[in-house]
Image (cartoon, rainbow, N blue to C red):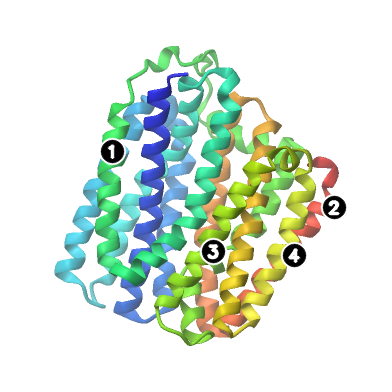
Amino acid sequence: MNKSSFRFLWIGQSLANSGDVFYMVGLIAIIYELTGSVTYMAFVPFFITASRFVSGIIAPLIIERVSLKALLAYSQLGKTIAIIILIGYIDVFSSINTSVLIFFFVIAISFLDGWANPARNAFIPILVEQNALVKANSLLAILDQTIRLGGWAVGGMLVAIIGGVNVLWFTFFLFVTSTFMMFLIPSIDRNIVSDEQSIKLSNWEVLKKGWVTIWQTPTLRTISIVEFFESIANVVWVAAIMYVYVDQVLQTGEQWWGYINATFFSGLMIGGFLSLKWSHLVDRLSSKVILVGALLASLTTLMFGLTSTPWMALVLSLLFGLVNQMKDVAQETLVQKSVVHRLLPNIYSAKDALITAIFGGSSLILGNWTDLFGVRFIFMLAATLLFISSIIVIINRKDI
């Protein structure tokens, strides 16, 4: 294993992924201050995910033709330049009439970001020996889940403490560090990466490889269907809707957004540590962990939406984070075991594109429905979707 190069890769990408979440949270707070509209707030994750989806779809084609190191390094450099321009624009032109133009910067940053995760996953077999791939993928899976969900918690706390614009500045410094680490990874001739890449495939074959593999593999197909419902439901926990819940249901100040996010993040960390401590049980009883986790996630979401007591909301957010993290670790482990390692980049490209599209569309739709039907209704809907995911696990237990 090229330990130093792999270290640059996972640390640099973790910093970049954290920055991606932080700037999304910071922009949500800024947009809400400018417009006071949940729908406008929801446009931030929508444009981010829609742009990332488009670039993620074509990522396999780019990976086939461009050095992975160059793709990671220069896309991250482009994001760094774009976000400093965005900060300057907000400082100078910040108003309700010009807030719409902010979304053009959001689209540009997210388009560049859509190449990163598939490229990273394709780089892993180059930097890591065959017998260490499972450990490497497990480490990255836990980091990704923690950042994807916990990043919103930390971002919410930072917004409450230092404000949205300063969160963007913090993101800029994370991007600078990440760019530096990407350039430290040694260049590797793509022609000697693997025999698999030397086989000439048509553009259509390259694009569809991951999707076909997911559909033809029972385990991947079941998990993807479960993640479809979970991705819609989890929008209530990690997007603008939580901001409204604190204001309208708990009727507390902005700091409680940070408090709830803090307990949510604590639950994720506890769940991650428990998964590592009891890894043999999570591995052996993965289907049961996923089923129980889905049921408990549904129950905690339902209770969270019904309560108006701030301290109870803190307890429930902690419990949701804990069970959700343990369930996600079990699901990622099953994904990694279901196919040969050389197919993982294609699998993750397809999975990322699917989850990205679902999250973006759900953020926009549920944000609008929150304005129309109220935030409690949205939490009831989310609990129902999580319960449906548990039913799917029960029906397809033989596949997982």
Packing grade of label 4 (10 A; few <14, some 14-19, many >=20) is many
Which amino acid is tagged 3?
Answer: Phe
The residue indicated by pointer 3 is: 264
Q: Secondary structure at mark 1?
A: helix
Q: Which residue is mark 2?
A: 395
Residue 233 in sight in this render: no
Q: Residue 325: image x %, image y %?
A: 61, 53
Residue type at the position of mark 1: Thr
**Disc 3 versus disc 2: distance between alpha carbons?**
30 Å
**Which label sits in the foreground, 3 or 2?**
3
Contact? badges 2 and 1 (CB < 8 Å): no
Residue receiving disc 1: 179
C-alpha span from label 4 to label 2: 13 Å
Q: Earlier in the sequence, mark 4 or mark 2?
A: 4
Q: Secondary structure at mark 2?
A: helix
Q: Position of residue 286 (x, y in %)?
A: 75, 44
